[in-house]
Image (spheres, rainbow, N blue to C red):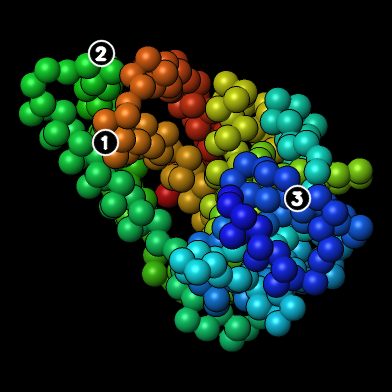
Amino acid sequence: MNDRVTGLLELYDIEAVRVRKGRGALLCDTDNGCFIFKEYNGSEQKAGLQDRVLKKLADEGVSCERIFPTKEGALFCQDTDGRKYMLKSYFDNRECNIRDSQECREAASMLSRLHRRMVLPPGEAGDLSVYSLTREYEKHNRELKKVWQYLCKKGQKSAFEVTLLARYPYFLNQALEVSGEWKEFALDSDTEYIKEKGFLCHGDYQQHNIIRGNREFAVINFEKLVMDNPVRDICLYLRKVMEKNNWSVELGESILHAYDVGNPLPARSFVELYYRLAYPVKFWKIVNFYYNARKVWTPDKNIEKLNILMEQEQQKQNFLDKVFRDVAHLR
């Protein structure tokens, strides 16, 4: 960030003792604590929703970040190029350790607390639309087919491309099968129910946004706030933890139990969680990154990612079979 961006801090009612660079942001030390000033890519409506949710969470005793408005009351400011920036409170502590089973369970409990409170009052959803998992899978499937055709037609292939091509049929078939089953299971009434209840998700609930406090975790970076089934957050968090813990059935079940104690999952939501976990999103990410960044590709590193994915696939399937063993009769 340049001096022009630093100058935007004058729009805020803070006295910065020191300004230092963080990862893609500025950290501002003041007499009232540390603040983080970073680029914001959302809309004014989204910023307003984010601010209301954060204030509600804080009022109900949940430790989370806070948005600080400009002197004129705006939730973000803009530079001369139209880039938007937001000033928020900053937690200078470590992230959740997802190799520590106790911390994993605590973070799951925190998520259940969030979900109980991240609910819009009746009529306040307005023109907010419910996220469509069906459309997401359809888009991913189109992208997977496109890259498959590209690889098949490509002449000389790198070692990574040869490895990717060998793995492709298994994961493409898996993607089509899971998304097909999900489409048959999903109901329009599920979407209507989410809208009616006003369910909101953090949108990026993973270890980097779960910060260790003195007594409990604090949650940050609500920019991806979205109206969706709460299992969206559970899926992302659980997948991140499981990938680092070899899809441990015991740990996974304890995490789901920790969440369920505070916010029990309905049967249909449990089935949806299965379909979200079963879709090969990690493979899609590897493929998507490869196709969009072919000119700057680093094959050795990504062959390793692909090999790790294959090594963990049997562990993942074992996890799904055991944790969701009762799902078959619910589908």
Q: Who's the residue at 66% across and 63% down the image?
A: 7
Q: Residue furthest bottom?
A: 123
The image quadrant that residue 238 belongs to is: top right
Query: Residue tagged by mark 3?
Result: 19
Secondary element at image label 2: helix
Q: Residue at x 62, y 23 (%)?
A: 245
Asked if the residues shown at circle 2 and circle 3 are in contact, with their CB atoms under 8 angstroms apart, the answer is no
Residue at the disc numbered 2: 159
Instruction: Point out which mark residue 291 bears.
Output: 1
Of labels 3 and 1, the one closer to you: 3
Rendered residue at 33%/19% (across/down):
299
Dot 3: element = strand
Between residues 22 and 53, which one lies in front from this camera angle?
A: 22
Q: Is residue 222 above or below residue 326?
A: below
Q: Is residue 264 left or right of residue 290?
A: right
Q: Amino acid at mark 2?
A: Ala
Looking at the image, residue 269 lies above or below residue 285: below
Residue occupying image coordinates x 22% and y 16%: 158
Q: Is residue 141 above or below residue 269?
A: above
Kind of residue at disc 1: Tyr
Give the mark nearest the N terminus, 2 or 3: 3
